[in-house]
Amino acid sequence: MNNNIDINENKGHFDFDDASRIECVEMGKRLTISDLTAISRYNAKVSFSESYVERVKKARNLVVKWIDEGRVMYGITTGFGVLCNQLISKEETETLQKNIVLSHSTSVGSPMPIEAVRAIMVMMLSNMGQGYSGVSVELLERLKDMLNLRITPYVPMEGSVGYLSVEAHIGLALIGLGKVYYEDQLQSTEAIYQSLNISPYILKAKEGLSLTSGTTSPTALAALAMYDLSKAVMIADVIGAMSLEVTKGTLKAFDERLMRARPYQEQTETADNVRYILKDSEIAKEHINYRLQDALSIRAIPQLHGAVKRTLNDAIKTIQEEMNFTGDNPIIWPEGDDGLALSGCHCDASYVGLAMDASCIAATVLAKMSERRNFRMISGQFSEMPWFLISNPGLNSGLMIPQYTQAALLNDMKMLSTPATIDNIPTCGGQEDYISMGYNASKKAYQIVEKLEYILAIELLSAYQAYQFQSPNLHPGTISQSVINLIGEKVPFLSEDEQLSPHIEFIKNLIHSGDMLRVIQ
């Protein structure tokens, strides 16, 4: 599949590039979303290619040469932001780089998940390893070693407008300050370094600036979000098909001839997916003419799921590109007679931010349809099954309350779908008079995925329970049955009320981990 998890290439087959099976990633080749997830979530090892090292050294040699020549370069021999007119001597360059890390470590609030911090470190390697940053190989080796040893800086999650503060907390750990996680324990960086005989890293010219510049944190969170959103939308096709199956829905709305009349690629492929899932379903065949047409939450699965997939595919393309570009400022242009330091604004996160704002909206409308399908399944007047899918409703509440949970989660998702990128609060004494807010957009996307997974899990719990009310003479489709069997390993068919939250968590984890997709494959 193009770009590893491109939904457009799915075409009825529920394949995805499983990050948990990647054991080592070589920096210097095109980095993928699955590569980043493999390192950050599944602890794949990191190595450097020869070309990676060579291009880093080439740019670094220029920085060293220019400092010796006394060139004026932003953030290298000058202050930062509005202080860019303040010159810094050659003797003060190391102090300048340490100071930017110390002064910019201002994130607050709850700690960022370990996988997210590791993902940012991967993006730092990719960003600074493009050959335009002018940092030393030693800095990148230290980041690589921390990833491979699973030493993860403690990073508060709140307080970034797109760069700087989150990254500075990672820089703190590099120079031996702050706290880190090691062997699942949070300890002082100094204590861990002493126990492992590691010396604090001394930042060289340009390195503190390069660590804190760029779109590394928005892109890292976005990549993790897109990996999980891609799995979720594939699973949503399966769950939607199972909901159709148990509610006596008709496959006529998924006819390939109908799709040809409005041939959006993602819509056509979604309809193909549903037909593929239910191709051998005796339940679906029996009820093909049961209704003239179903409610929109069933009938419009190709249209809405397809639109969501198109939005996510556009976002995946953007994130894949950003992962393999440089976001530093200034950049070191190594070509020409003597190279050049060019100052601009590649650290702007607008591409990522807009893509993630759109992805949040896409995730929410997918969840909106899932909640409506679930509502119809548990409502006796619509489903023609017992109210709340329990044999003795009244004495038992059955699956009444999980839909309340869906409603609350969906309300959260709607709030998270308010675009972050439309806001603007000037910073840096007016030097940064426009702010992308791309970090907050990516943070929302990273947070919204879990809520979508729970909403889909609750719909799937209802569909699973609804199979006990189908005719014993009619068999579900093979794919439906494989999902029923998987859930049935831990979740019983309800005959009376019991605690439901463990069942919801179990199904949600099947979705998040990719285990359900592996079974479907």
Image: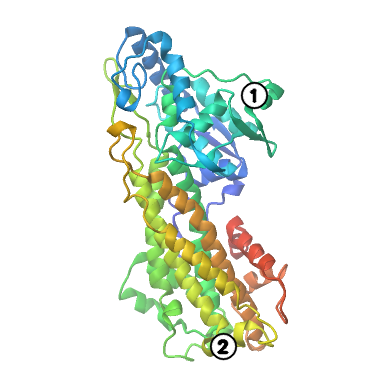
Residue 182: % across, % down: 67, 34
Which residue, given by chain and number where applicable, does mark 1 sit on? 190
Query: Which label is found at residue 436?
Result: none
The answer to whether residue 268 is seen in the rendering is no
Helix or strand or loop: what does disc 1 sit on? helix
Q: Which quadrant is home to the C terminus?
A: bottom right
The residue type indicated by label 2 comes to: Gly
Q: Which residue occupies 62% across, 77% down?
A: 399
Q: What residue type is labelled 1?
A: Glu
Marks 1,2: beta carbons within 8 A: no
Above or below for 94 versus 161: above
The residue located at (71%, 24%) in the rendering is 195
Image location of residue 224, percent across then percent down: 50, 48
Distance from Cα at disc 1 to Cα at disc 2: 62 Å
Residue drawn at 37 percent across, 59 percent down: 311
Mark 1 residue crowding within 10 angstroms, few (<14) / some (14–19) / many (20+)? some
Is residue 151 positioned above or below 89 on the image?
Answer: below
Q: Where is residue 243 in the image (x, y as percent from the top left)?
A: 54, 77
Q: What element carries label 2?
A: helix
Q: Quadrant of residue 161?
A: top left
Residue under the image location 41 percent in, 37 percent down:
163
- Give the residue number, with chain letter if any, for mark 2: 380
Nearer the observer, 50 or 20: 20
